[in-house]
Amino acid sequence: MSRTIAIVEDDIDQRENYRDALMAHGYDVQLYSNRQNARQGFQTRLPDLAILDIMLENDMDGGFDLCRELRALSPELPIIFLTARNSDIDRVSGLRLDAWDYLTKPVNLEFLAVRVSSLFRIADTLNSPDDHSDKLVVGLLELDQNSMSTRWNGEPVSLTLTEFWIVEAMARRPGHVKTYEAMMQVTRQSYVEKNTINGYIRRIRNKFKEIDSEFNLIQTVFGIGYRWQPES
Amino acid sequence: MLFSLFSDKRGLSLRAKFLFIVVAIVSLPWMGIRYVNEMKSFLLQGQEDALLLTAKAVGTVLNERDELFRPDTGVPELLGGTNDVYAHQLESLLQVDGDPIDWGSQLDTLRDFTGTLGQECTSIYEPHSLSVRHTLGFLNEFLYALFMVDDDVVLYRADDLRRLDHSDQLRMTIKDSSGEIFRYLLITRKSGRMSVYLMDKQWRYPLTGEPVSNINAVMVEVDGGYNIELRLPRRLIDADSRLGFDIVDVDSPEIRLPRDMIKTYPEADDEQLSRVMILSPEIARILGGLNTQIARIWILDTEQRVRAVVGNPGTNIPSKPESRSFFDSFGNGYNRLFDWLLQMPSDNFRDVETSESHRSDIVITKALNGEQGSRRRLSLDNRAEILVAAYPILSAGSVIGAVVVEQSSTEVLKLQDKALKSVAAVTLAAFLLITFAIFIFASRLTIRIRRLHFATEQAITSKGRVRNEYVDAFPKSTGGDEINELSHSITSMLGRLSQYTRYLEAMPDTLAHELNNPLNVVSSSLEILSNDSKEAGESKYMHRARKGLQRLRSILTSLTEAANLEEALEYEHREDFDLVDLVDGCTEGYQISFPNHLFILNMDVTTARISGNPDRIAQLLDKLVDNAVDFGEINGEIRLGLSVVDNMAYISVTNTGSSLPEEMKDRLFDPMVSVGSKDATQSHLGLGLFVARIISEYHHGTIEAENLPDAAGVTLTVGLPLVATKSD
């Protein structure tokens, strides 16, 4: 049984491009152009994953509202925001609503498909816990590559997919510098600047510091990139 | 600052201009005073003419009256000088018999000399022992004198004594016009006719044995004393004669020495004898009707001797306090100021006494030469101005005398002075009020304009951004005048400007957002296209389309980056870090990113710690290096430097190549300013160095561009304050 992906996007061209690309990867796709349509559709049948734009027609924050309603229907549903809004405030608001990822336009459809499949794998792992999960442990850091979950000193760190990939890339070779170019590949986005990477690192550090205020293992190598400092 | 007359820049401030206007207004009262003074001299001129007319009228009356000026008709009338004993025309013929009854009403003019003037001889004066009442009169050719003496002991001349100073006696001193002094002693052996002798200086012995025959005197003993009546011819006393009497009292028959002496003149000195003036009674009678308190008329003969005088040149009486309700508060100060401004002469002055026997003046000399004349002179104490008019008195074509009319100018101006003062006071008060009002008005206006000026300055930042908190605090006053309208229109202008600024600031964000959606359509469509058709995916056009998209994205990213930067910086926290590591690391990164350029790092310090956000400083450095790469020589070398001077760390990035135009140096760090580039495929919105500036300002630093000498290239330098080193 193929999985169903709901796409809520008011621009018909983008909407159908997403559909074409995802259907090419073998997914069923439901298309909605606004909040009312989407809500009716969700009540008939819940999708396995939802991709939401934030601005829907005249509804400035329609995506956020829809996300809240979807979360009420299913706490475990993977939700991705795919939007042109790139401010930190929107990003934080989206993730606070328990969205699994936040992508900004323009998006690379190939990368989108990769993310979607990653999110399905995570969802599967959550539904049927695997005993022999593929875990990467570096000192106090514990990365589950199936559920893509992160623990620091036993405590869960809620990272988005992109953030998980960045931490994983660094932690795989502690002490080695991950250059900005390498990081850009890891984020699996079409257009990334140094400053975008800096932003990701800043947010990752903050999330670790929420758990451990002494956390300082992610080191800046000025002008080149970042590295995971092996614990002494 | 508030009351500075000069505005901050050049030229006069509004307040100073107002001040000049006020000064101009000040000239109005000054002109008024000039006018009043002109008026005064005009009035005085008129008064002079009037006086001359008066003189002429009097002169005309006296014309052809030679007899009035003949010396022998002139009978000396004794004026008692300071004692003011006047000789009066007697009503009827007098018997020289010692009986005062025939003096009639003249007895009212008796003057009492009891101890009022100096006495001599003894130390203790007793009024009952000696007191004198005395009067003078004249009729026809004779001058009469009456003495009523109270004396407790009347002592007559003793037969056996040669010295004549041993009995009660009357001494008469006459000093004639040549200055010669004649001493007449009147003495008697019994009640009745008295003997008259010319005496020596000591009044002891007669000069000759012969008694003087033309002076008649009778002494009659009465109860408690005696009376003496005296008659002498008027010709004994000429124009410049002086006359004095002494009553000598001898009480003790044994000692027979003068006990008391009463004089009709102040001092025993001969010089102080009572003055005698020749006054023609006929003239005085003619002039009697002209007697006035506001002018004095003198009649002079050709020898400039005073023949008659009547009237008064002005009030010598101190003016009594008038009810000047309005001026009460101003008091004397105001009056004095006013008198000074108008050059008002005082009405309290001293001038030539009527007892003067001679007058001399330019106009008098002129009049005696047959010409009329008038002039103004100062009073003797310089306190008042006196108008003098003189007119000759003619007889048969020759001058026989002169009429002189004198009047104080104060008299002329006094009435108008009072009115003028009141008008001037009101004008002055109104003027002061207006000046004050104008000054207050000007100050208020200036203050309000200044306040508006500061408020406007404050409401807009140097970068042209409207600060809403200041716009709300804009000065609002209740009035509806032009300044308030200006204030309102500035407020609403600022409001619109602020809206527009907000719109402009939101513009890049909105633009990026709006453009990202179609961009997404294009990018996703291209992607699907190249997946569907391998041929299309490998086409060079597909490749170019992707490159174009990449550039579009780069533009949008830099737009939003600059627009959101300032806001984003506010939420970032600072940390202490070492610039040495940062610059070192970044340079290494740049060498990898731009392999075609040679990066040379020159650091002359081992540590340079600053407080801030290392990512942002790295971003700043990126922008400087991007700029150097974009505008420097292709494949040229790029030199980076880090140095420390005076608690500031300086990071410099130098590229070889063409210089900056001079006018660009200051504007280089403004948004949307670019010098252009040789590479058309690069986007140059001019935001890179703007971002660099915002970051350096966030770190309280400086940023500037300098051309290298010889146009060898350009150096951009960022100065950042070091963290204060702990001193321990």
Image (cartoon, coloured by chain):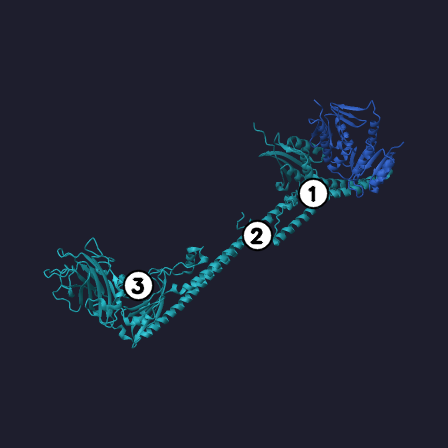
Chain colours: A blue, B cyan
Which-is-in-front pick, marks 2 and 1?
2
Q: Which mark is on residue B609?
A: none
Camera-nearest residue between A92 and B550:
A92
- Residue A17: tell me if it is visible: no
Check contact, mark 3 vs mark 2: CB within 8 A: no
Disc 3: which residue: B353
- For the C terminus of chain B, the image quarter is top right
As drawn, B481 above or below B378? above
Residue B355 position in % (x across, y down): 28, 64
Q: Nearer the viewer, residue B482 or A157?
A: B482
Any mark on residue B686, and which?
A: 1
Q: Is residue B469 left or right of residue A58?
A: left
Indicate the amino acid at tag 2. Answer: Leu
- Mark 1 vs mark 3, CA separation in Å: 105 Å
Q: Position of residue B202 (x, y in %)?
A: 16, 59
Image coords of residue B501 (percent x, y): 69, 46
- Given this view, does label 1 or label 3 mark the residue nearer the observer? 3
Does residue A159 appear to the left or right of B408 in the view shown? Answer: right
- Give the letter of the chain under mark 3: B
The 10 Å Cα crowd at callout 3, few under 14, some 14 to 19, many 20 or more, is few
Q: Earlier in the sequence, mark 3 or mark 2?
A: 3
Cα distance in 3D space between marks 2 and 1: 45 Å
Amino acid type, callout 3: Glu
Tell which subunit mark 2 falls on.
Answer: B
**Mark 3 → mark 2, Cα distance in angstroms:** 64 Å
Q: Is residue A187 above or below residue B503?
A: above
Residue found at the very far front of the displayed protein = B223
To which residue does mark 2 refer? Answer: B445
Badge 2 vs badge 1, beta-carbon distance below 8 Å: no
Q: Secondary structure at mark 2?
A: helix
Q: Is residue B139 visible?
A: yes
